[in-house]
Amino acid sequence: MTDHTFRGYPVTDLQAAFDKVVNPDDRYAPIVAEVSIDELDIVCAAVEYFTRNIPKVLVVDMSCEKFVVFGSRLEPEGDN
């Protein structure tokens, strides 16, 4: 069995990162999450992988250690 990766991250790691930023009460709500520089790359990869959208990122502080990641969500299957 082949391990699946996206942007160099195993999908299991992407799922863990995505679970940290997605709204647990509404998985289809837009994503707005503050993350550290250490989390930024994997969170952006996770948002892209699971939403099929490129996230937007804003710097929160002048030291460039904290960021806000914004991601659009796909509509649930069957909702048109």
Image: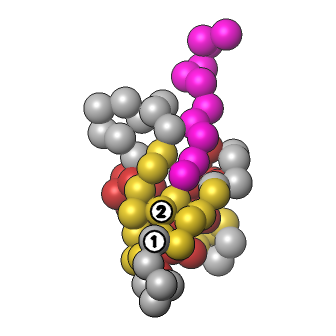
Say which quadrant the N terminus sits in. bottom right
Relative side of 4 to 69, left or right: right
73 part of magenta stretch: yes
Of the numbered discs in the image, which one, if any, rests on residue 68?
2
Query: Principal SS element in the magenta part?
Result: loop
Could you say where residue 18 lies in the image, as x and y percent from the top left?
A: 44, 55
- Kindly identify the amino acid type of the residue bearing the numbered disc 1: Val
In magenta, the rendered stretch is 70-80
- Taking the spot 59% from the left edge, 24% from the top edge, the residue there is 75
**Does dot 2 land on a helix, a strand or a loop?**
strand
Is residue 14 in view from this perspective? no
Name the residue carrying label 1.
60
Relative side of 34 to 51, left or right: left
**Does dot 1 land on a helix, a strand or a loop?**
loop
Q: Is residue 56 shown above or below 25?
A: below
- Kindly identify the amino acid type of the residue bearing the numbered disc 2: Val
- Taking the spot 45% from the left edge, 50% from the top edge, the residue there is 32
